[in-house]
Amino acid sequence: MIEDGPGIRTNVFLKGCPLRCKWCSNPFGLSRKPQIAYNQRKCVLCGACVAACPENACTIEGGRVQTDREKCTACGACAEVCLTHARVLVGEEYTAEEVIQRVREDSAFYRRDGGGLTLSGGEVLMQPEAAEEILRVARASMIHTAIETSAYASWERLERLLPLCDLVFVDLKHIDPQAHLRLTGVPNKRILDNIRRLWTYAAEKGSPEVVLRLPVIYGLNDDDDTMKATARFIAGLPGTVAVNILPYHKLGITKYEMIDLPYPLDPDEDGDPARLTAYCDVIRRTAPGASCSVGGGEIDYCRVRAPNEEVLADHH
Amino acid sequence: MTDSAVKEVGSRLGMEWRDGKSAEVGSTRRIQQLNRLLHANRPSVDIHRTRCFTKVFQATEGEPYIRRRYKACAETYRTLEPVIYDHEQLAGWQGKRIRCEQINIEMHADWLEGDLDQMRVRQFDPFEIDDADLQELREVHIPYWRDKTLTAVWAKQVPHPVKMVSSGIADCVNYLGSAGSHFIPDYAALLSTGYKGAYDRVQEGLANVDPTNPADIGKRDFHLGLIEVLEAVKTLAENYAAKARELAAAEEHPERKAELLEMARIMDWVPWNPARTFREAIQTVWLTEMLLSIEGAGPSLTYGRFDQYMLPYYEKDIAESRLTREQAMELIEEMYIKTTNIPWFQSSQLAYYFGGYYRFPHLGVGGLNKLGRDASNELSYLCLRAMRHVRTTGPTVSLYLHQKTPDELLLEAAKLSVEGMGHPSYFDVETYSRMLEYRGAGLQGKSPYTREQILELGSPLGCVEPGVAGLQYGHTDSGIVNMGAVVSLALNNGVKPAGLPGWGPGEQAGPQTGDPATFSTYEAFHDAVLEQLAYAIREVHAHMIVAEKIIAEQHQIPLFTILSTGCIEKGVDVAAGGAYCNIGPTIQCVGLADMANSMAAVKKVVYDEGSVTMDALRKALETDFADDEELRLKLRNAPKYGNNDDYADDIAAEVFQYFADVVRSLRCYRGNYADAAIQMVQANVGFGEMTWATPSGRHAMRPLADTMSAEQQTDVHGPTAASLSYGKLNYSAFTNGTLLNMWISRSELAKVINN
């Protein structure tokens, strides 16, 4: 159970990510460029794509359509003629206004249960101007806004978005710099700094709401030492820290196959649910101020009301 | 798992179901045992009612129908055998067995003769029947009744009787087999006076009959007949009281003995007298529901706003410590079990459309009171929760939603939804109130209902049809028009495609709207479809109003009349038009999405893109796409209703409105106008089997789309986009109700609720 924020939401995935996490569940978000994805299960081998491709990048070999990724320009001609939708274009260009139009379609649903827009990815901070414009218009339309980010960018870039967000999810993939580099391809200093600044910012301004997410990947970041070190880091953050432990899942495996990428982890391995609750226990012991949940389902989204608001509420 | 292991598990589960063990659920042991008893029995038929009807009708040959009908009903109730099982608190079984239905022989004799041998094994809704009863039906009752049934009499008066029951295009088989149906009694009034109150009013009416006034001809029969029926109801209760005493005398267990004596005391008092307690009130309600189901042949005998009319009794008992919440819940659960116990006995043709034995009883909670305030109360919660305990199919429990519905009540309802049983249904009070405001009133008028009547007594009945307790009578799922078949007609110049079952394959079934190859624009095709649609609607209506007249003259229903406001005072049976507001026969559509998607696909592929000719399309359809899967996929990829895409949704909204407008312009025999609906439950499967390949890319004889929902597997943008499409239709124009099914992953819903 993964949550993208409260209520019914429209999730906009921005393409492109500076990290290469080995467990990434959405490899469509890695490259900034549009890509052709191919689902062999839907393919009837009619050959329409082979005929339509202007670059001659498609061939039928071994009972499937092979795509020469060097030649493919992701023009979308094959997807257009594919009657079974086995070939689809992943990644389309929208103006911020076009995005917000789509988001507005579901306004009626947001009103009922506090849902809204979530910008996700990829990495939101790879397209900071677009993200800022979308969030600004959403805010002006009274739509609840959330972003999901790795915080791997300059603080200024992240800070510009914060006044436009009601809710920010930040991932912490690994507390150890070396391990972080090994598992995600980038060091974590900037991320840890940004997380500290983000929590300070949120505590001072009273907004946005911030949730720290810890993806737990069997054998890679769920050893006792990592748990303790992470918990100590959390204890050092200001304010009440909402921590959300994300269990490892393999729902993205098919997507790797669809864009001809190898799955970086052993596809037969599963996470151990016992480690998730163990993690929770360590955090609760070490950082008593933190509220910790497994999965996204139990996050308490209720805003902390200012004392005078509470008094008013009692009178009404 | 190996094949043999699968079979072993399967047969074990089957055996458990057969003896009802799996159904042993409920909030108390009593309920668990009763639930087990219910599910351990297969549906069967009883011929007690049939015998009474034959006996009375043979003895009264040549007398007025109303006298004969009332006498036959009275005879049925007076001599109904009282049956009491262990664990029971509520008295009343409609037949000699559990899940046993009385045959309304005056509806069914014509088709029954041919199907009698198949009754125990027919494909849909088989019924058990005793050998002796079978023989008696064959030798005594069917020969007497076969040319006197509604269908038999009607068939002699209309031009196309066979077409109207089996063409698969437009159909009124439900109307012909279900007189006595679709009704919400005014339970609040009944509880406050008991049947005795009605008896006093009938006596008064009798005293006021003026034999010198031509308008009063027949009124004496009316009043004398009702007196006999009311006395029969009283006798039935007395018989139950006596039976309970008899069982109590033989009972050794002191606790059960006391329960039986309590049942006897209650049956001494109700339903004849005003109810004084919750227990007496629920006993009155149950016995009435049961009697209506014996008297009428049709479905949708509705409890209505149970949490409103039962509340005073509940509150008083709780305040005076006569009743606990748990005891109230137990009684409600028992009523649910008893309600499920009544199957629907339908003709084989009708079972093909509506199979599943379900008789569409309906009980609702929530809504507004007549001042427009939230009407929910503790009973609303109990009724929803009782269904989570008892898990029966009946009654349909529903929540009437509005802006002031408390979140807690919505959550309680959602918790029931998570159980995955299809309970509860959700209704928007504002929408059905608007439907009621214009119900039966045609395109220009307004219904006779006041705002207060709608708010206080209005509720859905049956599956989804808006009704008002005690004030409305009429059949509300009468005619069915298959929109998928109508598209086929427009593509075949009005000829029903060969290769289809039922009446008339290869015959001219609709008007000659022209060879589609000559349709040079989309508008020409569009107009042909609408012309075929209007013809199908008018044709079935023309056939139904004849049946309506026969029902009014020959199928009087005394208990429905007694429980309808004002009928006694008017001296007019409710079937003959005595109700405050007469409704129906109505016309429903099936295959809305199939029509919209077919039109959208033709518009897109043939006219907008021009990538396929009309001729190629017709050839592909003729062979059911045997040689042209590519064309079928192309049609499949055209815009589809249910994805928040105006291209298809606008067409759906247009044909939806057009259907309603044509239906609502038609006048019925009792003076009201017809109402449109879309609520044909699982009829999309049976009608699908009678529908050829459609330009939506649907194969021949596959199911049509369900009610108003998007076509199967075509709403690919999630429930919010689908909901936005559904929101584009003008619901209020469907003054006989709309039904939308949405299937949501149980785990998703559970997640939301557990938060």
Image (spheres, coloured by chain):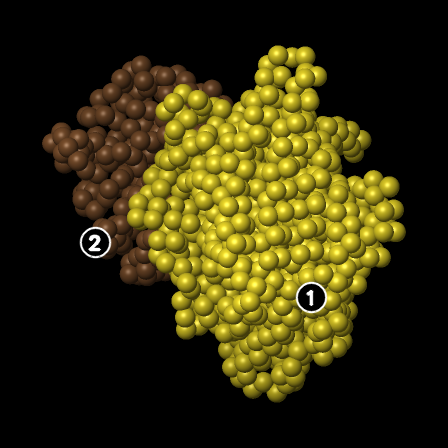
Chain colours: A brown, B yellow
Which residue type does callout 1 highlight?
Gly
Q: Quadrant of the C terminus of chain B?
A: top left
Secondary structure of the residue carrying tag 1 is: loop
- Name the image quarter holding residue B548: bottom right
Depth check, front residue: B370 or B360: B370
Q: Which residue is mark 1?
A: B168
In percent of width and height, residue B18 lies at 73, 31
Q: Quadrant of the N terminus of chain B?
A: top right
In percent of width and height, residue A156 lies at 18, 43
Mark drawn on residue A308:
none
Name which residue lies at 52% across and 27% down.
B330
Q: Residue furthest front?
A: B212
Depth check, front residue: A274 or B643: B643
In percent of width and height, residue B91 lies at 61, 31
Numbered-mark total: 2
Q: Are marks 2 and 1 in contact (CB under 8 Å)?
A: no
Name which residue lies at 49% across and 24% down.
B327
Of the residues tagged 2 and 1, which is closer to the observer? Answer: 1
Depth check, front residue: A205 or B672: B672
In percent of width and height, residue B314 lies at 42, 31
Q: Is residue B35 left or right of residue A78?
A: right
- Name the image quarter holding residue B147: bottom right
Q: Which residue is mark 2?
A: A140
Name which residue lies at 47% across and 59% down.
B580
Above or below: residue B284 compared with residue B221: above
Q: Residues within 10 Å of mark 2 (few under 14, many from 20)?
A: few
Q: Residue furthest left?
A: A308
Q: Residues within 10 Å of mark 1 (few under 14, many from 20)?
A: many
> Could you tell me how far apart the alpha carbons at marks 2 and 1 are, in whole angstroms?
54 Å
Q: Is residue B716 left or right of residue B449?
A: right
